[in-house]
Amino acid sequence: MRGTTAGAARTVAEVAVVPDYDGDSLARLLPSVAGAVGVDGFTDTLALGTYPRVCTVLVDGLGARLLAERGGHAPFLRRASRSQPDGAPAELRTAVPSTTATALASYGTGCAPGQHGVVGYRAFRPGTTDVVNHLQWPGDLDPLAWQARATVFERVAATGVPTTMVGPAAFEGSGLTRAALRGPAYVRAETLDARVDAAVAALSATPQAMVNVYWGDIDKTGHARGWLSHEWASQLERVDAALQALRRRAPKDALVVVTADHGMVDCPRGSMIDVAEHPSLRTDVLGTAGEPRLVQLRTAPGAAQDVAARWRDVAGDRAWVLTSDEALAAGWFGADADPAVMARVGEVLVAARDDVAVVDSASPDATALSMVGQHGSLTDAETAVPLLRLTA
């Protein structure tokens, strides 16, 4: 397992897992798929093999640790995990923050967050306290300008290799799709069975192809009920059966790859850091972005160190609190980060440990209080995602 522990910043303990974006990371998956398919300019660094057709299935929220813990509800995937190639990685590390928007942008572009610029569920517009919600894209923000790097799908499609994205109608043409995953033909399919049908059809239509399937219900259930709930287990059972059907029906010369964008941690209400209970946490804080398990704070000019110190005093060992400069030095956003991108990141970052989340019960938007499963931080449970190769 690659991935490094952060030692560059004094507040980061060894259990904070920082992705090696050039190693076994989610950012390397689609470039490796393109290499496996034989597209010029791409290399299969993840040792997927050589296949004319590959279907990647990204199951939102299906972290590697969660799958291992609840594998009794996924007998097909559990068997598949025991037959992976020797010497090839069985898991990857997602991006920081370990959240869907950032992970999908790294997945789609092959770049670290410091390069593609989708630096959280919510990020700051540079020089302001205005916040961009990457899942509810603002109408005045051009996705191609905000995330200008070519996606892997665009680069592959330009070579003439057919590329297809299978997902819900609501995601076609959305801001995040255009920013992170633009390029492939989009096939609308609402149910899990319909997405299997569409993937099989796309794989079978041409002798060479890259197909991607997205499924989000495991993540939704985890947020609402927690990943230890029986509802979450039921969703895993459905996905397991669908993936078995996809592998059975896909062309024999096709590879099916299963991965995820992040894992999850269940956060009891009693373990939360509530800003409303600690007035000092508001001092010199001009705005808040990020997510409950990796909060980004926009601070008054020159106040970042003082704000970080106050948050450390309150959080103690329940969170890693770094300035953005410390986080950048520790590799959270990858090497060669674009300064224009880092201007979207808050000056202070609060990354939760264990089962903690940061909330503000006095805020008019305190939705995190009702969410059981959460993600965004650098724990092993959140950053490790599966890499399962399903062959005929």
Image (tube, rainbow, N blue to C red):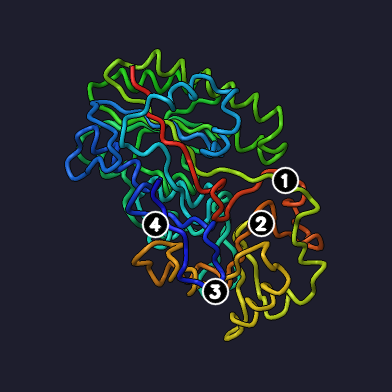
- The one of 28 and 81 positioned closer to us in this rendering: 81
Q: Earlier in the sequence, mark 3 or mark 4?
A: 4
Instruction: Give how far apart the Cα atoms at labels 3 and 4 are.
Output: 19 Å
Q: Nearer the viewer, mark 3 or mark 4?
A: 3
Q: Residues within 10 Å of mark 1 (few under 14, many from 20)?
A: many
Disc 4: which residue: 112
Provide the secondary structure element on which disc 4 rests.
Answer: loop
Residue lying furthest bottom in this view?
Answer: 302
Instruction: Give how far apart the Cα atoms at labels 1 and 2 are.
Output: 10 Å
Q: What label does residue 292 carry, if any?
A: 2
* Kind of residue indicated by mark 2: Pro
The x and y percentages for residue 18 are: 46, 57
Give the quadrant of residue 113. bottom left
Determine whether label 1 and label 4 are within 8 Å by CB: no
Q: Earlier in the sequence, mark 3 or mark 1?
A: 3
Determine whether label 3 and label 2 are within 8 Å by CB: no
| Quadrant (top left, top right, bottom left, bottom right) of the N terminus | top left
Instruction: Give how far apart the Cα atoms at labels 2 and 4 are.
Output: 21 Å
